[in-house]
Image (cartoon, rainbow, N blue to C red):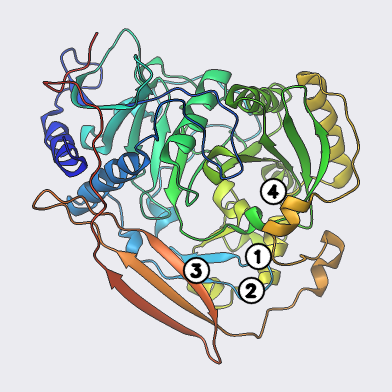
């Protein structure tokens, strides 16, 4: 069956999904991914022994279903109407004006001074979402081949992992990955859940698709285990930041400091196997959780690089150490803001957005250099690493960064750039009709210009059809 036909079948299956999530006999589309454990090569994709994975299918399935929910009015606002711009300067911070998001989001219902808190069924959790908000199940394949089942049963005894829309989206295609949803796990990473998120990044195979995680105390707003993900077709500023290698683990995972960025942190990459990388990162997250250290985490480069940010903003806020000027912005610096995508609540802040303002806000999130060193030692003790200092910035990272960002100490010297840029927002609208699956991606192209201009170019281009293995009859083998 061709890709487009499968996408249409998935849409039909979504309409058939009735009854409570715990209801017997409920059905929901299933994307069964191929579990791989190969070395992650330089291009960010994972090697396959048999054939290339149909990565376009996951993209088109996710975006097609997301667009369907948008057309049906399931979101609290139209994120595509939000103004967005790249802030002039060396870093390329991205600013979005989203004036109503903080008023329409679900409020935080737990303490912000404890990273680990028990699940509370009386508070909002993802078993209470509207059925139409759930897009599909995401599970490992039983026969180690990627497969799609448009009408698969929900296995209550083996709680499914699902992908659902974020009803308060930050960008196009903003979804939630909810591991083992019916187990009602609190917001805490374990090896299994992180491996699932990493497999999703690898399976998508799209460098513009990133997954993020916020712990409690680091602006997670729901205490039910979940990751976030969305598409943004330009580099995040953090992806351009240079790094300094600390050590390489026995499993080949390189661990480095992030340099010359307002939020200090660690970056993990490579690994002899995908499991090596997954275990080192998940064990690092577990260490932070057990030591009550709030953190944010970004999975980038199709799973090739993972950024980890221990943070202290909520603690400083509680101690009255954050300036009133920054508090007035009402920006809660979670994973997307820390990565450089600034979601601003006030028009004045958006119109006056500058690199200096972005830097000052994010610098409030960061641990001190001394505290980060202490946290690093805790992590290394938990993952049993020998620390081999390397004072040289890695050549690969220098090539990824086209600029030489300034240090924390030079923050006050940052000035808003007066160089004008031309931004071309390319929008490919998703229309699924006549058996053609189309997607819409927001992409920013930066080019020199004597004056600032924003041009909107509309494209309408179908994705090439691909065959994806599918069980006859559309039911999963049990």
Asked which secondary structure carries label 3, the reply is loop
- Cα gap from disc 3 to disc 2, whole angstroms: 14 Å
Asked which secondary structure carries label 2, the reply is loop
Answer with mark 1 or mark 4, whichever residue precedes in sequence. 4
Quadrant housing the C terminus: top left
Residues 348 and 12: in front is: 12
Q: Which residue is mark 1?
A: 358
Answer with mark 4 or mark 3, whichever residue precedes in sequence. 4
Residue 304 as seen in the image, left or right of residue 398: left
Q: Which residue is mark 3?
A: 346
- Cα gap from disc 4 to disc 3, whole angstroms: 20 Å
Residue 182 as seen in the image, left or right of residue 263: left
Camera-nearest label, 1 or 4: 1
- Cα gap from disc 2 to disc 4, whole angstroms: 23 Å
Q: Which residue is mark 4?
A: 317
Q: Which residue is mark 2?
A: 354
Camera-nearest label, 2 or 4: 2
Residue 421 position, x and y percent, is 55, 81
User: Residue at the location (15% across, 28% down)?
Assistant: 17
Answer with mark 3 or mark 2, whichever residue precedes in sequence. 3
């Amino acid at each position: 069956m061709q890709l487009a036909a499968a996408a249409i079948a998935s849409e039909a299956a979504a309409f058939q999904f009735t009854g409570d999530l715990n209801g017997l006999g409920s059905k929901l589309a299933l994307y069964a991914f191929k579990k791989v454990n190969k070395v992650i090569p330089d291009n960010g994709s994972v090697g396959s022994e048999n054939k290339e994975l149909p990565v376009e299918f996951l993209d088109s399935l996710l975006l097609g279903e997301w667009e369907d929910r948008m057309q049906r009015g399931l979101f609290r606002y139209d994120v595509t109407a939000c103004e967005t711009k790249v802030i002039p300067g060396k870093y390329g911070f991205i600013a979005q004006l989203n004036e109503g998001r903080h008023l329409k989001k679900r409020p935080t219902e737990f303490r912000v001074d404890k990273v680990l808190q028990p699940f509370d069924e009386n508070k909002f959790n993802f078993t209470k979402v509207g059925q139409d908000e759930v897009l599909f199940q995401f599970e490992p394949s039983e026969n180690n081949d990627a497969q799609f089942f448009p009408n698969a049963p929900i296995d209550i005894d083996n709680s499914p992992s699902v992908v659902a829309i974020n009803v308060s989206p930050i960008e196009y295609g903003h979804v939630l990955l909810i591991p083992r949803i019916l187990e009602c796990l609190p917001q805490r990473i374990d090896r299994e859940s992180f491996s699932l998120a990493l497999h999703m990044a690898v399976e998508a195979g799209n460098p513009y698709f990133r997954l993020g995680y916020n712990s409690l105390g680091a602006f997670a707003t729901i205490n039910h285990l979940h990751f976030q993900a969305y598409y943004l077709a330009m580099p995040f500023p953090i992806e351009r930041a240079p790094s300094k290698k600390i050590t390489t683990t026995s499993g080949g995972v390189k661990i480095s400091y992030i340099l010359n960025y307002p939020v200090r942190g660690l970056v993990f990459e490579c690994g002899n196997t995908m499991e090596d990388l997954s275990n080192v990162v998940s064990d690092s997250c577990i260490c932070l959780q057990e030591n009550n250290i709030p953190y944010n985490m970004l999975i980038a480069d199709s799973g090739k690089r993972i950024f980890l940010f221990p943070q202290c903003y909520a603690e400083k806020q509680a101690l009255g150490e954050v300036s009133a000027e920054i508090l007035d912005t009402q920006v809660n610096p979670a994973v997307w803001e820390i990565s450089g995508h600034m979601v601003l609540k006030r028009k004045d802040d958006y119109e006056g957005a500058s690199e200096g303002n972005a830097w000052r806000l994010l610098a409030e999130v960061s641990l001190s250099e001394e505290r980060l060193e202490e946290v690093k030692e805790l992590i290394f003790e938990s993952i049993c690493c020998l620390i081999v200092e390397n004072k040289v910035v890695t050549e690969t990272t220098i090539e990824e960064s086209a600029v030489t960002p300034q240090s924390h100490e030079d923050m006050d010297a940052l000035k808003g750039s007066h160089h004008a840029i031309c931004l071309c927002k390319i929008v490919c609208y998703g229309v699924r009709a006549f058996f053609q699956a189309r997607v819409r991606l927001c992409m920013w192209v930066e080019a020199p210009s004597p004056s600032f201009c924003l041009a909107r170019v509309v494209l309408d281009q179908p994705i090439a059809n691909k065959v994806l293995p599918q069980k006859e009859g559309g039911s999963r083998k049990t």
